[in-house]
Amino acid sequence: MSERRISADAVLALERQFRFQWEPAQNAHVLLYPEGMIKLSGSAAEIMKRIDGKRTAEDIVADLQQSFPGTDLRQDVLDFLEDIYGRGWIQAGPGR
Amino acid sequence: MDEAGFRRAPVGNPIWLNAEVTFKCPLHCVYCYNPVDYTRFGPELSTAEWLRVLREARELGAVQLGISGGEPLMRDDIETMIAEAHRLGYYANLLTSGVGLTEKRIAAFKEGGLDQIQLSFQDSTRELNDFLSSTKTFELKSRVAKLIKQYEYPMVLNVVLHRLNIDHIQQILDLAEAIGAEHVELANTQYYAWAYVNRDQLLPSQEQLQRAEEITNQFRAKVGKKMKLYFVVPDYYANRPKACMNGWGSVFLNIAADGAALPCHEARMLPGLTFPNVRDHDLRWIWNESPGFNAYRGDEWMREPCRSCPEKVKDFGGCRCQAYMLTGDARNADPICDLSPHHHLITEVVAKAQHPGPPVTVRPIVFRDDRNSRKLSEPAQAQGIEATSSVD
């Protein structure tokens, strides 16, 4: 994915109809929305955990790099964020 | 399980809990999916019993909660249920006609953590013909829509379409736009319960359907992104069945007002099955062990043409209730499927619906109310049903 639609200073937040939570019965984090549920992989959940209405995409990358040192995650994380932004799961608002 | 020849299919988690908290309703919709004999059922579950149902279902993995009815707002403890549901981690949806939705109540729902309100839009009044011009309807929906927006919920509208209102699709869409609806489901009536009783009066013609779909498509192009529009065609105009409930006892758990635990809204009609009541059993046993919930899991129960059909993994043979209602045996293929030897039962009804103008009927349309329910509960049902109004 080359085209970036999330601007560098945008803070990321879940769209208002979405809720992110741990589901013991699924043994996974999930994203809940009206009449549906998306089961998230472990790495997707690590990214989603950091979407808090305060961090920008680069903040999230930096935070993940710190938690999971040794591999370059930047491209994958940014691609994932662009993808879920395109799906309407998150909003990218102006910085503080 | 001690039934001979019974093979256990793998049991997953229920994802959906649908709480039909009451069968009381101020409306009398002629297509209501509540069982026609609801007046026969025992007393409603208490608040404490509902809270136990919420906890037990959550432990089993249910995460989407529908609070429906009847009209759920006929109960005064919905606030308590919502707060507990939210505390337990449900995504809570309230399905309401809007009748009884005051600002005090919606404020309490928001406070308690209700996630979504789905407002239904219906021709509930007995003045079917002019319901759309009825200022009463418009005022109620506008007032409720305003409250929904004020409390920062998205406007989710559900409109049930049928022969008698489908030609007003443009007015329905205009009204949806006027009240600021963001999600609109135009759901054609499916023929169960009261809608089955009134099927001849409610099934639209092919021409009506096509016209409504065209108008909907034009409207969708016009409004663009601000409104998501879904148009659901009636089963009777399909040639493959729906994957009903995503499979029997697969993800959906319905608890009726009297505590009956059911794999779908309609399953109580099926003969030879007894469905447990939450007053007598815990939900873990009900979901995993009860014969009713295991009856049509997997595909061991299937007959031909489903049994050897490659599509059985996709549609699970369709709807057991539809198979029973139309063919007399729930194990048969859903006759919606054109591979079913009973498919002619559908095409004959559809053929009858193609005559232009009002349907020729031998008896008037039957409104969902207690009096008609008691009549339909009698053995010689459908005889001598009184209609309080007829449609021309």
Image (tube, coloured by chain):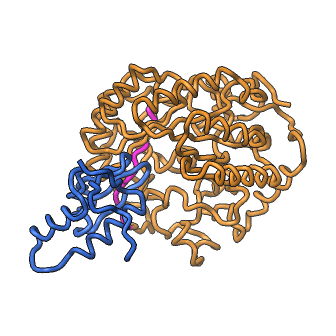
Chain colours: A blue, B orange
* Image-based side of B300 in relation to B166, left or right: left
Q: Indicate the position of residue A78 as horizontal and vertical percent values.
A: 29, 70
Task: Work out whether residue B289 can be spotted.
Answer: no
Magenta span covers which residues? B10-21
Q: Is residue B177 magenta-colored? A: no
Q: State the image coordinates of residue B119 (x, y, percent, origin top left).
A: 53, 35
In this rendering, is residue B385 above or below B4?
Answer: above
- In the rendered image, the quadrant that contains the C terminus of chain B is top right
Residue sitting at x 81%, y 27%: B390
Nearer to the camera, A37 or B355: A37
Is residue A64 in view?
A: yes
Q: Is B22 on the left or on the right of B325, as rendered?
A: left
Looking at the rendered image, the quarter that the N terminus of chain B falls into is bottom left
The image quarter containing residue B258 is: top left
Left or right position of B125 against B63: right
Q: How many numbered badges does the structure rendering display?
A: 0
Vertical side of A8 occupied by B200: above or below: above
Q: Quadrant of residue B137?
A: top right
Q: Is residue B49 left or right of residue B28?
A: left
Q: Nearer the viewer, residue A81 or B345?
A: A81
Q: Residue at x 57, y 78 (%)?
A: B310
Q: Position of residue B73 (x, y in %)?
A: 46, 25
Residue lying at 35% horizontally and 45% vertically, measured from the top left: B91
Position above or below: A19 against B134? below
Residue at horizontal 30 percent and vertical 58 percent from the top:
A30
Q: Is residue B18 magenta?
A: yes
Residue B17, horizontal then vertical, whole percent: 39, 46
Name the foreground residue: B223 vs B162.
B223
